[in-house]
């Protein structure tokens, strides 16, 4: 879904579904132009992990691990395989909770990995952030 | 008619504590994630694995598994459905 088209859509589940997309995890976060997608994702995933009802193992451990790995990447201090594991975890977790909380969370994660793929790769490989705004914050 | 209803493996995710015996007994269909919780291959259990699947279900210490009949395969359903809709449509479309 191109941004141009998405911007014109109403925030309505039915309309979004008709366009082949959805609310994802149901969190709306506005990104300023200078903000880093990795840091924004880390913030939301931390929230999603904290909102787990803590009933099912995959959600409890999976979302925690995803939030932690994303936070490490956001802080430019990722472990060597964090990005690779994020990709694996976000495909493995879908549909493995009694409720749909983890599904929404990993839908956002997969989408973020796709949309901000360059930024994620930069954080993982070069351990740096391309956004001046966030670089100032980290330092 | 279809010979035997196909069965699939259902997991009670809340019950599951990640003992991992299921993956030990049925590695063909069940693998464990990084925390020891099962990832079950979707769909019907092949006939030659049914016995193993039953054993995996029985051995779970917290009884988190069951074998459940799957809804009839979608490939069987469409034929009568399209027939019916084709029959239903003409009166609606006839405008003359």
Image (cartoon, coloured by chain):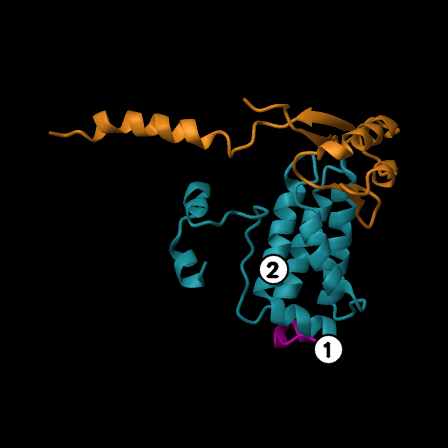
Chain colours: A cyan, B orange
The magenta stretch spans which residues? A126-139
Which image quadrant for residue A70? bottom right
| Gap between marks 2 and 1 measured at Cα | 19 Å
Q: Total number of numbered labels?
A: 2
Which image quadrant for residue A98? top right
What's the residue at 56%, 27% (across, down)? B72
Q: Is residue B38 visible?
A: yes
Q: Which residue is mark 2?
A: A112
How crowded pointer 2 is (Cα within 10 Å; few <14, some 14-19, many 20+) is rated as some
Q: Quadrant of the C terminus of chain B?
A: top left
Which secondary structure lies at badge 1? Answer: helix
Q: Chain of mark 2?
A: A
Disc marking residue A28: none
Q: Which residue is mark 1?
A: A126
Q: Are marks 2 and 1 on the same chain?
A: yes
Mark 2 / mark 1, whichever is N-terminal: 2
Q: Position of residue A126 (x, y in %)?
A: 73, 77
Q: Does B19 lie within the magenta span?
A: no
Q: Chain of mark 1?
A: A
Q: Is residue B88 above or below residue A67?
A: above
A67 or B86, which is in the foreground?
B86
How crowded pointer 1 is (Cα within 10 Å; few <14, some 14-19, many 20+) is rated as few
What's the residue at 61%, 50% (across, down)? A107
Q: Does A129 lie within the magenta span?
A: yes
Q: Position of residue A61 (x, y in %)?
A: 79, 46
Q: Is residue A36 visible?
A: no
Q: Position of residue B84 (x, y in %)?
A: 35, 25
Furthest-left residue in this view: B96
């Amino acid at each position: 879904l191109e941004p141009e088209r998405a911007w014109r859509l109403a925030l309505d589940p039915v309309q979004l579904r008709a366009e082949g997309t959805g609310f994802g995890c149901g969190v709306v976060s506005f990104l300023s132009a200078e903000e880093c997608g990795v840091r924004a994702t880390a913030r939301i995933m931390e929230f999603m992990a904290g909102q787990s009802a803590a009933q099912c193992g995959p959600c409890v451990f999976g979302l925690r691990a995803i939030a932690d790995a994303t936070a490490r990447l956001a802080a430019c201090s990722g472990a060597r395989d964090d990005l690779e594991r994020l990709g694996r975890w976000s495909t493995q977790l879908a549909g493995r909770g009694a409720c749909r909380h983890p599904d929404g969370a990993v839908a956002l994660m997969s989408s973020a990995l796709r949309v901000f793929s360059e930024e994620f790769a930069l954080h993982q490989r070069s351990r740096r952030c391309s956004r001046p705004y966030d670089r100032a914050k980290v330092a | 008619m279809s010979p035997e209803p196909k069965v699939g493996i259902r997991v009670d995710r809340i019950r599951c504590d990640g003992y991992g015996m299921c993956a030990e007994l049925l590695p063909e269909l069940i693998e464990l994630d990084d925390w020891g919780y099962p990832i079950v291959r979707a769909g019907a259990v092949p006939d030659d694995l049914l016995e193993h699947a039953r054993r995996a279900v029985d051995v779970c210490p917290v009884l988190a598994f069951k074998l459940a009949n799957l809804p009839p395969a979608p490939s069987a359903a469409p034929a009568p459905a399209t027939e019916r809709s084709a029959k239903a449509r003409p009166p609606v479309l006839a405008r003359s």
